[in-house]
Amino acid sequence: MTTFIDDHREVYGVEPICSVLPIAPSSYYEQKARQADPSRLPARARSDAALEPEIDRVWKENRLVYGAHKVWKQLKREDVAVARCTVERLMRKMGLRGTVRGKRVRTTIPDNVTTRPLDLVDRDFTATHPNQLWVADLTYVATWSGFVYVAFVIDVFSRMIVGWRVSRSLRSDLALDALEQALWARPKSKDLVHHSDRGVQYLSIRYTERLAEAGIEPSVGSVGDSYDNALAETVIGLYKTEVIGKDGPWRTADHVEFETLKWVDWFNNRRLLGPIGYVPPVEYEEMYYQEQEVPAMVVGLK
């Protein structure tokens, strides 16, 4: 309305226009004074003006996927004093919103013939330290050149993605390559349990032999629904929402692989995860190892 008056005041004058529009001349002049001198703005308006660039920055730095809660948590980590309701209100005003997860489509094919390992997890996806329990699963991505498949291996303690691979073929080598990366990244695998669903990729002879060679105890879901591998399903759901569903269309396997690489780096090093206290997986593991060092230092001083 102020802009309309600015555009026509030279012809009709401010007061005649205001007599027709639902605005008092004093209100118009106050708005113009505030534009010239921002210090005249109300305290809330000044605060909003300072917060909006910070909210926009956090949202853009985190792949445009954070909703108000995660943006608020990140601002708190940066010592920006703001209420969650304020972040919600300003994000609504700015047209910013987080991604919404869709339904999970299963890609592993159950093997009901092969003798499979016992279910050592029984839907209890908890761990007290890194390299205690890994979960693994697969998903697919449609591209212009056909389907490609992505395998993940996740450490349950911190939700760290310790291994992943992209392939044009849904074969046992895909899952095995992701496992090999995890073993390279985490060579100390003593007393480690590896859990998966009943997919043929994870029950193949080569895969089970590699687990045995590394001294890893295999575990396979006993029922065959998504809850038997719920944590892996959750991480893959985030991947499909924050990468595949947001950044397409996908051209080639190389395109998917490059964007997956960027997402995994962000996920492990910067993404805030609620189940571990709204910190990134890397930071959560660092906190664990720092806590382990303190008792050792105390013992050494005695």
Image: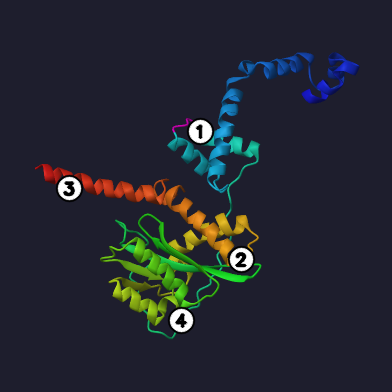
View extreme (right): residue: 11
Q: In this view, does 50 lie to the left or right of 14?
A: left
Going from N to C along the chain, the mark reached first, 1 or 2, is 1
Give how far apart the Cα atoms at labels 3 and 4 are: 47 Å
Decide which of tag 1 and tag 4 comes sooner along the chain.
1
Q: How far apart are marks 1 and 3 (CA)?
A: 40 Å
Q: Earlier in the sequence, mark 2 or mark 4?
A: 4
Could you say where residue 219 lies in the image, as x and y percent from the top left? Answer: 35, 72
What separation in Å lies between label 2 and label 3 (alpha carbons)?
50 Å
Residue matched to label 3 = 296
The residue under label 1 is: 83
Q: Mark 1, mark 4: which one is toward the viewer?
A: 4
List the residue tagged with mark 4: 111
> Disc 2 marks which residue?
252
Q: How crowded is mark 3: few (under 14 residues within 10 Å), some or many (20 or more)?
A: few
Verify whether residue 81 appears in magenta.
yes
CA separation in Å, label 1 and label 4: 51 Å
Say which of 126 and 8 sits in front.
8
Classify residue 102 as left or right of residue 29: left
Q: Is residue 9 above or below residue 168?
A: above
| Colour scheme | rainbow
Please name the amino acid that badge 2 sits on: Thr
- Residue appearing at x 52%, y 75% in the figure: 170
Residue at coordinates 45% horizontally, 36% vertically from top-left? 76
In x, y percent, where is residue 156?
37, 59
Q: What residue type is labelled 4?
A: Asp
Please report the bounds of the magenta region as a residue range: 79-83
Q: Distance between the residues labelled 2 and 4?
A: 30 Å
Q: Which of marks 2 and 3 is nearer the N terminus?
A: 2
Sequence-first disc among 1 and 3: 1
- What main secondary structure does the magenta stretch of the protein show? loop
Q: Which of marks 1 and 2 is in front?
A: 2
